[in-house]
């Protein structure tokens, strides 16, 4: 049985919207006003179109699930689809070659002893994936999974987007949202910095918890520490205005191999101290020291900066410990 548009609102989550063109489904993580800013630069245009965090999530009696996919743009040379069966990672299917081309995702449910099973499929986080010809068994039931406890919004750079993990479910926003039982919108964007202009205009997603994790690119690009602090403060004030009542956590940068280097804004820890100081002057923000979230082992990073899948597992576990569960709104 081939599914159609009337099923899509039930099936797809962790995105702001979807659209269909020529039979292909395209998903969006950013608002129109945000995309207008980001797509002015090809580098950010590619990353903004990646499907980080986007998922298909359904409870169904079908024993098979199949769809066609095509990969249009990529920020990294790989693309995988992670499938969870009743909350357990059961398959990771995809390509480790440059993510451009097309293929078919096909999965047969193993015997679980259940009449209906929950299937959750995370789309590639570092490539733009579009899908079509979504099929289940003829006559299969389709039900919406249990309602999430709340909603999580993650704002940040490439590490928030999930790079350099291979699997989309390795990204810390996905892992944290799964553990806390939250709907997710991952607006991580490779190469980005504190950009107050991205928080202007209407925002249809109403998060209960917001995580903001910039700083490592700001360290590279800021003309001075004071210039960084001014821009970060303007961004954080914008977040407080845009997300009233949400619990907002600000993560300082994680360890990186060159953290002791001195740049125009000082070393990396100077950036962290400036962020903590800024947060202390803005009621409603909680600063979390990110420096030790990933152990300082080069083997847990692909390039001394971006965590591996294993590195992200440490990141998520230690972040959850720092959060102490689901924070109450500020």
Image (cartoon, rainbow, N blue to C red):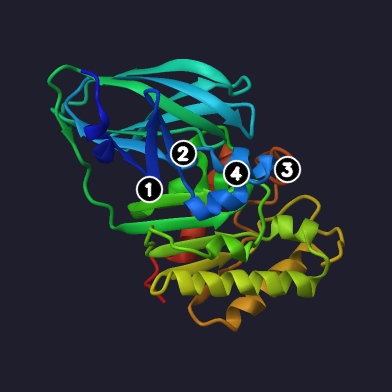
How far is disc 4 from disc 2 in space, using C-alphas?
13 Å
Secondary structure of residue under mark 3:
helix
- Which class describes the residues within 10 Å of circle 3: few (<14), some (14-19), or many (20+)? some
Which of label 4 and label 2 is nearer to you? 2
Question: Upstream in the sequence, badge 2 or badge 3?
Answer: 2
Question: Upstream in the sequence, badge 1 or badge 2?
Answer: 2
Query: Which residue is disc 2 drawn over?
Result: 169
Vertical placement of 247 versus 180: above or below? below
Query: Which residue is disc 3 drawn over?
Result: 298
Query: Which residue is disc 1 drawn over?
Result: 178
In the drawing, does residue 249 fall left or right of residue 264? Answer: left
How far is disc 1 from disc 2 in space, using C-alphas?
9 Å
Secondary structure of residue under mark 2:
helix
Secondary structure of residue under mark 4:
helix
Quadrant of image for the N terminus: top left
Q: Give x and y (percent) for residue 324.
A: 43, 66
Q: Is residue 315 visible?
A: no
Label of residue 311 in the image? 4
């Amino acid at each position: 049985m081939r599914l159609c548009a009337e099923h899509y609102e039930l099936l797809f989550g962790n995105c702001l919207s979807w659209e269909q063109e020529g039979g292909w489904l395209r998903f969006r993580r950013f608002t129109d006003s945000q995309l207008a800013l980001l797509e002015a630069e090809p580098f950010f245009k590619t990353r903004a179109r990646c499907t980080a965090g986007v998922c298909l999530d359904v409870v169904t009696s079908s024993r098979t699930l199949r769809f066609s996919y095509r990969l249009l743009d990529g920020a990294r040379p790989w693309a995988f689809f992670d499938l969870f069966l009743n909350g357990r990672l059961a398959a990771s299917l995809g390509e480790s070659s440059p993510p451009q081309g097309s293929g078919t995702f096909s999965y047969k449910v193993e015997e679980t002893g259940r009449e209906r099973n929950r299937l959750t499929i995370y789309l590639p986080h570092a490539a733009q994936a579009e899908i079509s010809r979504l099929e289940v068994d003829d006559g299969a039931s389709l039900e919406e999974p249990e309602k999430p406890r709340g909603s999580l919004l993650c704002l940040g750079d490439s590490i928030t987007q999930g790079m350099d993990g291979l699997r989309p479910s390795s990204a810390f926003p996905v892992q944290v949202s799964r553990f806390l039982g939250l709907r997710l919108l991952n607006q991580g964007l490779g190469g980005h910095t504190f950009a107050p202009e991205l928080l202007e205009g209407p925002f249809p997603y109403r998060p209960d918890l917001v995580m903001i994790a910039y700083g490592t690119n700001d360290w590279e690009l800021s003309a001075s520490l004071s210039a960084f602090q001014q821009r970060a403060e303007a961004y954080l004030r914008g977040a407080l205005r845009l997300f009233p009542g949400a619990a907002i956590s600000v993560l300082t940068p994680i360890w990186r191999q060159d953290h002791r280097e001195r740049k125009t804004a000082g070393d990396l820890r100077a950036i962290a101290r400036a962020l903590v100081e800024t947060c202390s002057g803005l009621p409603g923000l909680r600063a979390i020291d990110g420096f030790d979230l990933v152990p300082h082992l080069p083997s847990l990073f692909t390039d001394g900066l971006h965590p591996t899948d294993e590195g992200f597992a440490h990141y998520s576990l230690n972040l959850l410990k720092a959060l102490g569960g689901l924070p109450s709104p500020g």
